[in-house]
Amino acid sequence: MIPMEHYLIVSSIMFFVGLYGFLSRKNLLAILISIELILNSVEINFSVFNRYLFPEHMEGMFFSLFGIAISAAETAVAIAIIINVYRVTQEIDVRHIDKMKY
Amino acid sequence: MEFTIYIILVPMLLFFVLALGGRWLGPRTAGIIGTAGMGAAALLSYIAVYKYFFAGAGIGPDGNYLTVTGFNAQWLRLTDSLHIDMGVLLDPISVMMLAVVTTVSLMVHIYSFGYMKGERGFQRYYAFLSLFSFSMLGLVVATNIFQMYIFWELVGASSYLLIGFYYTRPAAVAASKKAFIVTRFADFGFLIGILILSYCTKTFDFGAITADNASLAVRTMEGSSFLGLSSATWAMLLIFMGGAGKSAMFPLHIWLPDAMEGPTPVSALIHAATMVVAGVYLVARMFPVYLFAAPQVLTVIGYVGAFTALFAAIIAMVQTDIKRVLAFSTISQIAYMMVALGVSGMGGHAGEGYTASMFHLFTHAFFKALLFLGAGAVIHAVHSNEMEHMGGLRKRMPVTHITFLVACLAIAGIPPLSGFFSKDEILSAAMEGDKVLFAVLWIVAGITAFYMFRLYFRIFWGRESETARHAHEAPAVMLVPLAVLALLTCVTGFIPFSRFISPDNAPYALGINWGVAGASIAIGIAGIALAAWLYMRDSERPQRIAARMGGFYKAAKRRLYIDDAWAFLTKNIIFRRICAPIAWFDRHVIDGTWCGIANVTQRTSEAIKGIQNGRVQAYALLFIISVLLITIITLFI
Amino acid sequence: MNILSLFVVIPLLVMLLLFVSSDRRYVRTVVTTGFSAVLLLAGALVVMFLRERSVSDEAMLFVKDTVWYPALNIHYTVGVDGISVAMIALSAVIAFTGIFSSWNMERNYFLWYSMLAIGVFGFFISIDMFAMFMFYEIALIPMFLLIGVWGTGPKEFAAMKLTLMLMAGSAFLLTGILAIYFTSGATTMNILEIARNGIPLGKQYWIFPITFVGFGVLGALFPFHTWSPDGHASAPTAVSMLHAGVLMKLGGYGCFRVAIFLMPQAAEELSWIFLILTGISVVYGALGAIAQTDLKYINAYSSVSHCGLVLFAILMLNRTAMTGAVLQMLSHGLMTALFFSLIGVIYGRTHTRDIREMGGLMKVMPFAAVCYVIAGFASLGLPGLSGFVAETTIFVGSFQHADLLRRILTIAAASSIVITAVYILRAVGKFLYGPVQNPAHLQLTDAAWYEKLSAVALIICIATIGLWPSGVSTLISDSLAPILEQLNLL
């Protein structure tokens, strides 16, 4: 059996890659992808902890499924917003979308 | 004696009728209603006098006068023991005052018909006169000190309204304001005095306070003191302050001369005969308390009175406005009454001062009203208050001349006119009480004779001025009151006052002290002679003497700078140094503090709003750093 | 439905009906009918209260208790005693006359005006602190809009300042109310139950100042009074009337009902601090008024002085002075409403409120001028008008206190009767008397019928209290028994 640490290392890498992408990418779509990475890393963790620590329970698995569903919905909403933003501003560079300030 | 309540209710009703319905009534009807109502009130007062003094309603089994309560109803309950009542108290002085007030008021009502004819606001004038009569009568018959205070305030207000009757004239407006505020200031003292008195005695009732030689007040106010003076002294001194304000005692006299801006009949009624003696009446009303609980205050009253008498008489000598002369003479004469109270004792002959004071109040009311109404007739004829616009009027206005002369002789203390008798009593009371006061009053008697005859000669003798040439006698409606008052001036002196009025309500016999009387007649005649020598014929003598007096003459003409001192105090000290800085302080310091807090909040938010820059990634970075920080903190602390 | 709830329901109905149409005639009909109904209802309440009082010894009458939020034991409880009845009658009169003083206003104005009325009436009928606080806030919010939208001068600034300061006060208040809720041990917001339960003395020492200041801000307690001059000066006529006449009374009434009633021991021991503050209010406000030249500022400072006297008298903690405090609330409410209504009349015609720019208005608009003089006389405490009755009761009551400091403070406060005379007569002498200063003013008309109606109604109330004070005085002083019993628990 693959030790739990391996999963955790992968998910940590995914998480920080996603985080880095979220903070550094300028394209809204790329940011969205980064968010997906973060979410998926979390879901991996849920499944792994469930599998290794409480094999007789299924809550972690369910939670991952929920997460996947939510991230799908969230992506749909986010893309809708991005499209709308694009329609108005003709661009998806996050540095230029700063209308919502003080 | 229940009917006496109507003496007060009738003028009150008149006030409401005239004030609310005056516009629809028309001047003539309003005047007739007002006068008729006042006539009814006067008639009721005379019935009250008759019943009280002569028909036995007021005489007890031991021959002393009783205190009869004609009516009493609770008006406002304050604590279990303190309540303000409205009622009618009848005792010798209040019955006497009822007669005086209604008589003079009736005369003024009749006289005003001629004097105020054609004035704008005729109905309003009569309404105010009714208001004043109502308030003054209510004051006189007050059963408790708070009722007196209530009506005291009301007479002040009606005086304010009447002085400011010609409200478009700035001088009248200023004078009315001054009169109200000065007396209000004095009333503040009065109120505090009442509060102290009621705090100790737990009652407002005159009967309870003054009964048994004011034993209640003496007992309850014993032992307590504040700043070195006993509470009785404080209370009575402050109550006297109220009286001093209304009765224009130095240094609160400044409003009275200015009050002459009002219509002349008003001056006759309010500022000569009735309202201004309210202070004397107040002291007389509280006399047992003064005498037994705070005798020092009585001494103060005597000396304040004597000083005021002299002070006002000196100023009266040099005034040229005839109403101002009369105003200062009023101050001086009221001060006479105060002195008489100040030297009085209790019981039989010792109470001569008290009797004399009330006697002088009585006679003074008539002859001073007469003087004012006469002066009004003169002013009506020449349309000026200044002496230089008069002169030689004796042929053109014979009736006015004769009645005015009668009044002048009365105030100068020439027998057999009323002023002689009352003044003689005051002087002899002072003689027995305090020699210094006697000396002052004796000198004042001479000065009084001098300035009154200066006034008389300058109006009716001397060279005719341009305006005096067109003068003509006043109409009959104005002459009748003059004649009635002149008659009263001639006969009232013969009333044996000590049979009716004494501090302990026990009648006693009092004869004329011929030694004092001789001295007073002598100095009176000397004063008249001096005035005749200076003013009967047109001459240079007065100017020469004035020039020789130099600074003192000027000072007296400026009323010895007391008005200027008050003006300085109010304008420069209170307004500029207190009120204006307070207003500034409020706007800039206190409000500034609160606005400052608001401003600091606003500045702070301006400064930190940069964090909210609209960039998602910056937020995220901040968020992550914060989470990390919090994690680290919770892990390591 | 309970008669008391009607006081909230009728203005609410008026509000709803106003949404229907903004036609001016319709709006006038609706508000006049509505507030006349409130006035009649207030009259009926007084009669019913007196009848009920004679047969019942309950502290509060017409009590109706409805559970509102059971989890926190919050109720909507209404009930009245003599003091609240007096305040309700006052509010009804002023709300009614206020309509006639703002006769030409538009629909939206009256919407907020009705909401203000809901808040005010709701506050006076509540005996549950939560409902009380809620209505208090309901009364504050419309004020912001009424001043900010329909005001004059720097209206936005004034509205903001007023609202912020009062909100700061209610922040104190909310803290105080929550503290009372949790410390009393009764876990209820009902004032009567809390009073029965009592609050521990140690806690009272800090809750009392908080609640007193919280309400005191609205009662123009020095030094938290500075919203009053600006607010009054900028507010439209009827709002000034309602604000000075009724809303400021919420402060005094609240101090009474919450701060003193629930924490009598702390009130007794800490009152000297607030007595000094309120004493300062009284004299300082009056002195400040002397230096003002704007009519509304004069009256605003005068309100500081008079409302200071209300709080001053409440803190004396004896029956006479407290009766005087409520009388003073009534009297000040009526006369200040009269003042502001007349200032509205004058300002509407001359377009200035500066007394130096006017003169001789007595000749130009005699009716308004005479009413102003009467209001002035009421303010300076002339017997026969309400001000005298109130001040007398306060001074006599306060002076009966055995403590020397309190008596000296009473003397200091009583000096305001002189100062008041100065500023009132100064203003009257300057702008009503004298020659007409501005020839353009000669063409001005006197008050219109609706303005006259408003003034006459208020004068009748002032004179009634002034001439026949014993009725209202007894009504109030009988209701003080529960509070005084609380004090005797010491």
Image (cartoon, rainbow, N blue to C red):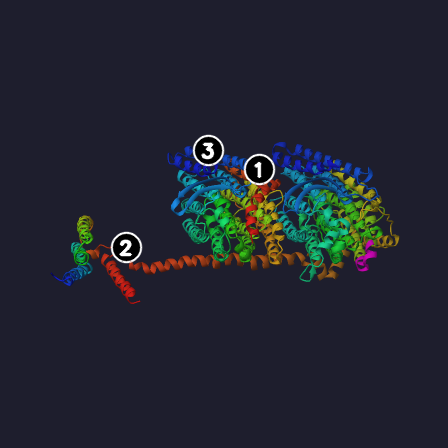
Spatial separation of the CA atoms under disc 3 and disc 1: 32 Å
The image quarter containing residue C413 is: bottom right
- Would residue A92 be found to the left or right of residue B42 on screen? left
Q: Quadrant of the C terminus of chain B?
A: bottom left
Q: Which residue is mark 1?
A: C54
- What amino acid is labelled 2 in the image? Lys
Which numbered disc covers residue B24? none
**Residue B102 in view of the camera:** yes
- Would residue C185 be found to the left or right of residue B350 on screen? left
Q: Are marks 3 and 1 on the same chain?
A: yes
Tell me the chain of label 1.
C
Give the number of marks: 3
Q: Quadrant of the N terminus of chain B?
A: top right
Q: Look at the picture and state if C43 lies above or below A88.
A: above
Disc 3, SS: helix
Q: Residue at x 47, y 41 (%)?
A: C78
Spatial separation of the CA atoms under disc 1 and disc 2: 65 Å
Q: Residue at x 87, y 50 (%)?
A: B512
Q: Does residue B246 show up magenta in the picture?
A: no
Q: Within 10 angstroms of label 2, few (less than 14), some, or many (20 or more) residues?
A: few
Tell me the chain of label 2.
A
Spatial separation of the CA atoms under disc 3 and disc 2: 49 Å
User: Which residue is situated farthest in the bottom direction here?
Assistant: B636
User: Which residue is situated farthest in the left direction here?
Assistant: A1
Residue B170 x/y as whole percent:
60, 48
Residue B614 x/y as whole percent:
26, 56
Q: Which residue is mark 2?
A: A101
